[in-house]
Amino acid sequence: MALSIMHISDLHLETVPESFCPGVMESLSRSAPLLRDQRPDFIVCTGDLTSHGSARRGNLALAREWLDALGIPYLTLPGNHDQGANRRRGRDYPETEFYEDVPFAETNFGRVFQQDVLVTRDLGPVTVVAVAVRDGDPDGAVERLDAALAATRGPVIVCGHYPVVRVRDEGVLATFGFAESIPATAPVLAQCMRRHDNVVLYLCGHVHASTKRPISDRLVQLTGGGLGPGPSVFRMLQVNAAGLDWTTHFGGGPLDFWMSREAGLSVLPEYHLGHPEERVGHISF
């Protein structure tokens, strides 16, 4: 049985006129037909569906409508803009990363998407597990992930929002990753995945770049771009019983990194879009 999985991340949807990412809704409008044209069997969206969803539930409802309108089965999870990751950033950025000091099910994301902190999908040749984490793990997500992985048989793809290892060794992405959001929880999450030999891939977002990094000698971390604000890319994974191949495709938005653009920085396109060996690859099962 062959299966195609699309990985998208960091849509940053917001109501027009946009305040956080001007022009993002037009970018997403151009991206939608490109996604449909790929005809994936399943979509994984690794968070930051919105820019203000942690504070404004209506934006998450719009994000759900946007995903539903694609007409393709999907699984998603919250990013720091959909569900604030820690109290400090919630205080510093109340409009974009508001921290909801309530159980997961009572957060804006939990109410709109009506899903648990951990969701598992058996897709035939592979099992996909989505996990939502906040720093300090108040929802017990990592413990539940550990138990769920122990019960799986065959290859597993784990999906989260935050990278658990550094995505670049230089430039802004050398420090922009998990440390500002889940500094205590990311190492625990990485250790959990390393314990289970059948976890072959970790899909995540947050950094608005298309990168590949090893978590262990058998486990790969792939970050998606920023489909809405840029770099507007998405991944396609072709999966069968023997393994998977991934390719990287352009979306309908900007192809540079939004933080660098705002800062007036100029860097090589490969820094954010990924080097050739990061844009395509293969994992054997």
Image (cartoon, rainbow, N blue to C red):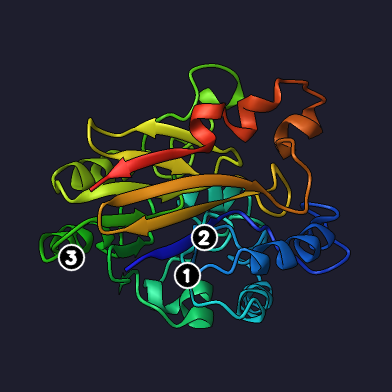
Which of the two residues, 134 or 243, is positioned nearer the viewer here? Answer: 243
Q: What is the C-alpha distance between the residues marked 2 and 1?
A: 6 Å
Q: Which residue is mark 1?
A: 42
Does the rendering let one see residue 179?
yes
> For the residue marked with disc 2, what is the amino acid?
Met
Indicate left or right for 10 with 159 as reference: right
Asked if disc 3 and disc 1 are in contact, CB closer than 8 Å, the reply is no
Quadrant assignment, res 170: top right
Disc 3 crowd rating (10 Å Cα; few below 14, some 14-19, many 20+) is: some
Q: Which residue is mark 2?
A: 6
Which residue of the protein is positioned furthest toward the top in this rendering?
170
> For the residue marked with disc 1, what is the amino acid?
Phe
Disc 2 crowd rating (10 Å Cα; few below 14, some 14-19, many 20+) is: many
> For the residue marked with disc 3, what is the amino acid?
Ala
Q: Position of residue 36 (x, y in %)?
A: 66, 69
Give the number of the disc on residue 148. Answer: 3
Secondary structure category for the residue under label 3: helix
Does the rendering let one see residue 224?
no
> Disc 3 or 1, which lies upstream in sequence?
1
Secondary structure category for the residue under label 2: strand
> Disc 2 or 3, which lies upstream in sequence?
2
Q: What is the C-alpha distance between the residues marked 3 and 1?
A: 21 Å
Quadrant assignment, res 132: bottom left
